[in-house]
Image (tube, rainbow, N blue to C red):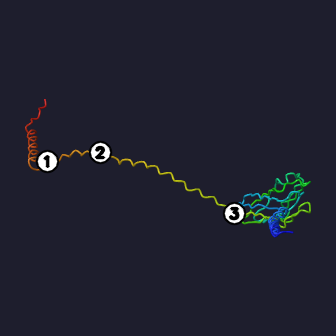
């Protein structure tokens, strides 16, 4: 007969097991879903950005394919390279079409013998940024082999954001060269040598004693002429 103490122990163990199962089960189920995801990238118009497409919970897969939709007015795919997850796929077993549609690209790969890891990068896609704005990088037409895989109902879309091209900062005006000290102004011309005072022009004496002297001289000369005898001619 089960005692009350034993019954309580059984009930506690049952409740604990149920709670543990509820906590663990979603994780177990989620781990079984094969899921793709794309990265979010940002750049400016004219740049090229690389979007990584990754896969999770993919152990045992033998290949797959997907389409990616985008806005061609914002970004257009220009190149693609396979990632580490499909490194065992031969070149002819990894194919793509970057122009599957005007706004869609497609990727397909085959990894025979389920020789894949549980997660990794399927491919890297280069997009040229052609216009400002934002575009979602969303999945469509996702298929995996074999058919009995537990595939996620939705896959994680990425995005590309194109910022306005930054205008270069104008070069700051360089500090102007300081004006060189102007040549000192030359000393003004020295004062010219003063012009010598012109010799005074003698002024003939007039009037007074000077007039008497002149008159006396004139009289003496006249007397001399009168007294002088003329020479005789022989």
Whole-number angstrom distance, CA of label 3 to CA of label 1:
112 Å
Whole-number angstrom distance, CA of label 2 to CA of label 1:
34 Å
Residue 195, above or below 112: above
- Say which residue label 3 marks: 163
Percent of width and height locating residue 12: 80, 68
Q: Secondary structure at mark 3?
A: strand
Percent of width and height locating residue 220: 8, 41
Question: 113 and 49: which one is in front?
Answer: 113
Q: Secondary structure at mark 1?
A: loop
Task: Pick out the residue farthest to the bottom.
Answer: 4
Q: Quadrant of the N terminus?
A: bottom right
Residue 191, above or below 120: above
Question: 109 and 34: which one is in front?
Answer: 34
- Say which residue label 2 marks: 193
- Say which residue label 1 marks: 205
Between discs 3 and 1, the one toward the N terminus = 3
Q: Nearer the viewer, mark 3 or mark 1?
A: 3
Q: In the image, what residue occupies the spot 16% across and 47% down? A: 204
- Residue 180 visible from this viewpoint: yes
Whole-number angstrom distance, CA of label 3 to CA of label 2:
82 Å
């Amino acid at each position: 007969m089960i005692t009350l103490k034993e019954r309580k122990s059984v009930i506690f163990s049952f409740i604990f097991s149920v709670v543990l199962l509820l906590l663990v089960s979603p994780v177990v189920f989620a781990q079984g879903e094969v899921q793709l995801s794309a990265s979010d990238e940002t750049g400016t118009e004219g740049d090229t950005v690389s979007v990584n497409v990754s896969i999770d919970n993919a152990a045992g897969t033998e290949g797959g394919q997907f389409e990616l939709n985008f806005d061609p007015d914002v970004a257009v795919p220009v190149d693609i390279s396979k990632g580490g997850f499909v490194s065992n796929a031969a070149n002819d077993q990894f194919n793509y079409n970057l122009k599957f549609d005007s706004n869609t690209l497609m990727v397909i790969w085959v990894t025979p013998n389920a020789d894949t890891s549980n997660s990794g990068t399927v491919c890297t896609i280069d997009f040229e940024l052609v216009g400002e704005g934002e575009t979602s990088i969303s999945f469509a037409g996702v298929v995996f082999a074999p058919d009995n895989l537990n595939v996620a109902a939705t896959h994680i879309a990425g995005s590309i954001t194109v910022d306005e091209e930054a205008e270069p900062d104008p070069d700051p005006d360089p500090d102007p060269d300081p004006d060189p000290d102007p040549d000192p102004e030359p000393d003004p011309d020295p004062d010219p040598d003063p012009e010598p005072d012109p010799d005074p022009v003698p002024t003939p004496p007039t009037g007074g004693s000077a007039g008497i002297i002149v008159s006396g001289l004139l009289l003496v000369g006249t007397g001399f002429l009168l007294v002088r005898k003329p020479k005789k001619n022989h």
